[in-house]
Structures are given as C-alpha cells and as structure tokens.
Image (spheres, helix red, strand yellow):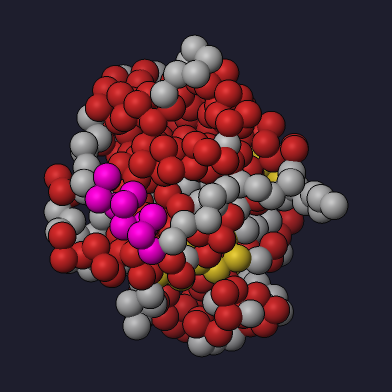
Amino acid sequence: MATLTYLTTTHFDFGAIQRIPSALRRAGISKPFIATDAGVRAAGLVDTITDTLDGDVPVSIFDGTPGNPTEAAVLKAFDQYTVDGCDGVLCIGGGSSMDLGKAVALLAGSGGPLAQFDPLAGGAKLVKSVAPLIAVPTTSGTGSEVSVGFVIIMADGRKLTFASPLFVPKAAICDPELTLGLPTAMTAATGMDAITHCIEAFLTPTINPPADGVALDGLWRGWRHLPAAVKDGGDREARWQMMMCSTEGALSFIKGLGAVHAMSHAAGRIERLNLHHGTLNAVFLPAVLRFNAPECGEKYERLRQAIGLAPGADLAEAVSAMNDAIGLPSGLGEMGVKEQDIPELIAYAMKDLSAVTNPRSATEDDFEAMIRESF
C-alpha cells in the first residue's frame, strides 16, 4: 500500500519574492528571524528581500550559518531568535541556511536538546510543533524549501538527518532571479546536487509513482540545462529550469534517498575539509550507479530516457562525463580526502538514514569499495 502526501505551497517564477509579505502574513509571522549566511548577505540578497517587506516589519538577521551547519551555530541562532522575540523563521540562502533555520524553528516549537529528535532513535515522535517557516532559496540544489528534512553536524561529530512533515516550510518562494549571480563552481555543484536528488529518489524502492514522475521531470530539466547555466550564469531560461529541477528533486525525495547521500553526509562531517555536499554527491554518484545496477534494470532504462541516452548506455559514465564537462573534481583525492579517512566514512555511512532506502543493501565492504572507487 502506498501513502501519498504532497507537500507545500510554492510560488515559482522571476519576481516571486514579491509574494514574501503575504506569505509571512498567512503564516502568522509578524517578527521574522532571518536565517542566512555572510555570503548571501554580502551579495545584497537579504536587502533585496527585506526591501519587499512592509516598512514596520521588524526583523532579526542571523548571518552566521556555516557551510555545513553545526549544532553550535543552531544554538547561537536560537538564542538570538529568543532574545529578539521572533515568532517565525524566514530562511534566505542555500541548503545550509534553510537547514539551520529549520533547526531553530524546531527548537522554538518543541524545545531541546536537538539530539532527541534523531529519527533513527525514534525521535520523530517527539516533534510536537515547529515555529512557522518560509523558505527562499538562493541556489538551485538542495530543494530544502519544500523538503521534510534537514541535516546538522552535532557537537559529538555525528551528521544527523532530521525528518518530519512538520519541517516542510509553510511556503516556498522560488525566484530564479536570486541565482543569476551564483558563481560557476557553485552552479555546477548545486546543479549536480539537484540531479542526484532526482536520480536517488527515483531509484528508492518506496512506492510513490507521483514522486517518480516528478523526479524524472526534474532530471529531464536539470540534465539539459545545467551545462548552459554553468557556461552563462545570466541565462535566465537555464536558471529557471535549474531551480525547478532543484525543487522537484526535493519534492521527489519524500521517497527517501540512497547510498550517495549516506556517503556524502559521512564525508561532509570531516571538519578539516568542510566539503560541499553537492560536489560530494556528484563524485559518489557514478560508483553508486554501478553498485545499484543489478537491482535497477527497468528503472535505469527510464533514467536513460529522461537524460537522452541510448538504450543500454552506461549511466555512470554519463555522470562522470557531465562532472568533467562542468568542471567538478574527478574524485575524493582531489578534494583532500585521505586513505586514513575511509574507516570513518564507512562507519558513518552505514548509520546514515539515507542508507535505509538505497535500492540495494550495502555492507561495510560494499561501502568501502564505493568509496575507493570514488577516489
């Protein structure tokens, strides 16, 4: 039996940020806490958005979100939320800012500590309420603006995925205009993040045909338009299509994800490297596609159709060629991962929530082989 749920209100197009004031009113937010990062603020995007608000709306801006959000940053942000008397969260940025904002909203609604909500330990049932959330993405990658989850590096070093339907923002404001200035490398990395979401969600064994259709549509858009978005950041059509791919990727991973994300989460917690999640996804994806092939014959044919490959073509090679064409690293070694990191990567990947929905069960030896192949 399949239980189907779909998801939130998304305002999508150039100029969509003009919907932010009404979205805040509908959500009951009168003093928004803005979760963002220093780069987004320096680029003027926070000012662009606050300029749309009514003049008497007070805001509290937190721009200390790390590239991989940490429990310490969440607690600092929540302290500011509380001291400033905020009543909801407006996330402005990429996946990191949205994840941090969701964590703040969870603490505001259900109290702490954050670790008690770990779904692998049964913590999802402890989520009683969440402060109202509005999300405004400034990249086209994570799709966190419409997703049920967020990821935080905990004080004990674990990188935990938290999931609940209550974490879905009340509204997503998707304005491709905000991505026109995104640097080339970030465009490539976030684009492959979105494409990986579409592929992994489609391949999970969870039964949800509507989500499968969304995933394939997102993949179709992303695969065709990512090279153009990387080549010319001002290509409005490519930017529109990549933001739609990103949103659809997250709408589809209501089904779950897979081994790519399990390993990316494990590698993303290596503090000395601070690796970008989307880049890790791109690097791990070919090895995982080869590993999953015995379980995914018919689904691989549908993936080939979506990205325009000939029947029987090598999906893993196609992904590797795309990574090369858009300038992403060729492997983990180039990103600074070392041989001595492998045991830790295996251990954390085995325990990651995303590993549960991989279409083929992976042992420690399997994860080691995929990691080594990705060097």
* Position of residue 333 in the picture relative to residue 22 (left or right): left
Residue at x 49% of width, y 37% of height: 293
Q: Residue furthest top?
A: 310
Q: Is residue 124 visible?
A: yes
Query: Which is nearer the eye, 73 or 280?
Result: 280
* Position of residue 214 in the picture relative to residue 284 (left or right): right
Q: Quadrant of residue 138?
A: top left
Residue at x 55% of width, y 68% of height: 162
Residue 371 inside the magenta-drawn segment: yes
Q: Position of residue 119 (x, y in %)?
A: 59, 73
Work out whether 280 lies above or below 97: above
Work out whether 246 lies above or below 122: above
Q: Magenta region's main secondary structure?
A: helix
Residue 180 inside the magenta-drawn segment: no
Residue at x 31% of width, y 64% of height: 345
Q: Which residues are magenta?
A: 364-374
Q: Position of residue 355 (x, y in %)?
A: 50, 59
Work out whether 339 lies above or below 214: below
